[in-house]
Image: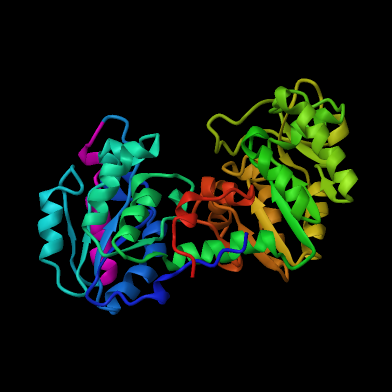
Amino acid sequence: MALNKKSVDDFSAKGKRVLVRCDFNVPLKNGEITDETRINAALPTIKKLVADGGKVILCSHLGKVKEGPNEKESLAPVAKSLSEKLGKEVKFIADYNVTGQAATDAVAAMAEGDVILLQNTRFRMEEETKPAKAGEKFAEELADLCDDYVCDAFGSSHRAHASVSVVTKFVRAKGGNCAVGYLMQKEIDFLGNAVENPVRPFVAILGGAKVADKLNVIDNLLEKADTLIIGGGMAFTFLKAKGLEIGKSLVDDEKIDYCKEMMAKAEKLGKKLLLPVDTTIAAGFPDPIDNPDIAVSVVDSTAIPADMEGLDIGPKTAELYATEVKSAKTVVWNGPMGVFENPVLAKGTLSVAQALADADATTIIGGGDSAAAVNQMGLGDKMSHISTGGGASLEFLEGKELPGVYAADDK
């Protein structure tokens, strides 16, 4: 799966209209952006194209847009933030049609180095319509606005949407380049290539709530990794599959047989599959989730009482997992070890995060809650790479072909 894709460094944007699909799906509160991580992540690619003298046309979705176009999910606040960060006006095209006359006129008036931002691509229902053919008209309209196309939206790259992958067909048909931006390149280098060609020992850590979400990831990583560590809510399905009492802990009864199969597979392949040896338990899930007054105790994983719920790995498990990470040369982590949003139940996740921070290894955080956890704990800058796409990084770890990655030209 070695991916050798054309990047923004492989063509000249000078004088060209370049459409860049970004991931500006930022959290908003009362019209204000509460976390600008995704905007910051897009800046290197935008700055490179501006410096080259390109005419840069940015597009992205924001939110799920359940009730049609609306001001609450407009990209206007993103244009404001980008203007401040780039030190130049990023002209916002507020037209709900996205590719209508307002966009056409604005693009026609662009000078080299100008930047415009189109309206939320999901304001056009065709953006995510299935089958893909239904989105072809919108994709063609997007392609009509540009000469070249750059995908830098890793968080959306697992979706075969009009602005993510379908558009490349029309850009390529008129001789344009279809490349990846710096953010996408980094994700391909770390996530794709670390899993395919890891420096060993390779340790994979999976946590989070549900086994079902990570079925194929577990299977794929057992083939690739030397050690697979399981924590979080999904560990209890494995413990139950071993015949243990798990009390009121989260369990996916339909996946018991699958967990048995995976444990047998690990044994057959001679891989280590580590499960929690002790568990932090409480009478029930914290309400509210961050309630610091929750009473907890630690028991061996073989001795969880029937009326208690496991909510984090225990200290012995944390030490076991940290020791495994210390000897690794490549570590991929997706999913917290417990209810990390609660200060009392964050110890397991913190200890794993600290172990990665201290490790002499390439450390890759697979987006989502694990990314939130390491950033919240102030350890983000100690990791080799934090993925910007939860769902996309999971599918990459499964070994799936991501439409947004595969739609780019090969070098």
- Picture layout, residue 355 above or below residue 231: below
* Quadrant of the rendering where the N terminus is positioned: bottom right
* Residue at (55, 29) in percent of width and height: 287
Closest to the observer, 309 or 83:
83
Residue 248: image location, x then y, percent: 72, 23
* Residue at (29, 79) in percent of width and height: 52
In magenta segment, residue 195: no
Asked whether residue 30 is in view, the answer is no
Highlighted magenta segment, given as a residue range = 68-86
Closest to the observer, 78 or 28:
78
In magenta segment, residue 82: yes
Q: How many marks?
A: 0
Closest to the observer, 245 or 288:
245
> Residue 261 appears in which quarter of the rendering?
top right
Query: With 366 as the anchor, is 206 left or right in this view?
Result: right
Residue 271: image location, x then y, percent: 85, 51
Prevailing secondary structure of the magenta residues: helix
